[in-house]
Image (cartoon, grey):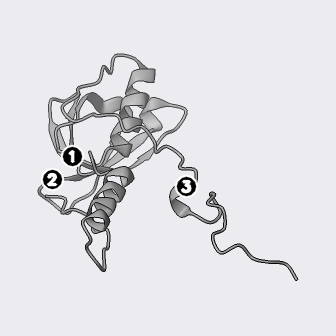
Amino acid sequence: MTEVPSNPPVNATTNPDAMEVAPGAEHEMLEGRIPAMATEEEIRAALEQAFGYRGDVTITLKTGGRIEGYIFDRRPAPALHRSIVRIMPKDTSERVSIPYSEIAGLAFTGRDSAAGKSWEAWVQRYWEKKTAGEKNIGIQSEALD
């Protein structure tokens, strides 16, 4: 008969606190930034960043017009005039498609609603509550505004 130890050794398979944790993605702070858009490469890079941004941006058109809103889609193509970005303007339910070739400038003007909301911060709050002796602890998300 094999004897089972009363206190098995603590390792990553028996203790979730000892499990390996992979680092999260680095989140670049873009709020307030105005990227250079002089070359085709810079235009494409700036619009790719804007697509991943979780706040409003302001697009300045070559005609002088400006559109502020949330970029919800982009469709890159080999030619700049065939690539489009799709934006939901701030004060309307309309959806606007803009060819990359018509964009003169871009600014990250809205608050990034996900900035500072990392998994590590949620876990830290959980452990603070648990250490304080709270029961029935859940990790709740913070209000965005």
Q: Which of the two residues, 23 or 11, is positioned nearer the viewer here?
A: 11
Q: Determine whether 8 is above or below 60 in the image.
A: below
Residue 11 placement (x, y as % from top left): 63, 58
Pointer 2 residue = 90
- Amino acid type, label 1: Asp
Q: Quadrant of residue 57?
A: top left
Q: Quadrant of residue 46?
A: top left
Instruction: Please tell me how crowded label 1 is: few (under 14), some (14-19), or many (20+) other residues with Cα within 10 Å.
Output: many
Which of disc 3 and disc 2 is earlier in sequence? 3
Residue 72 visible: no
Pointer 1 residue = 56
Query: Is 48 positioned to the left or the right of 108 in the image?
Result: right
Which of the two marks, 1 or 2, is nearer to us in this view? 1
Q: CA distance from mark 2 to mark 3?
A: 45 Å
Residue drawn at (66%, 62%) of the image? 9
Q: CA distance from mark 1 to mark 2?
A: 8 Å
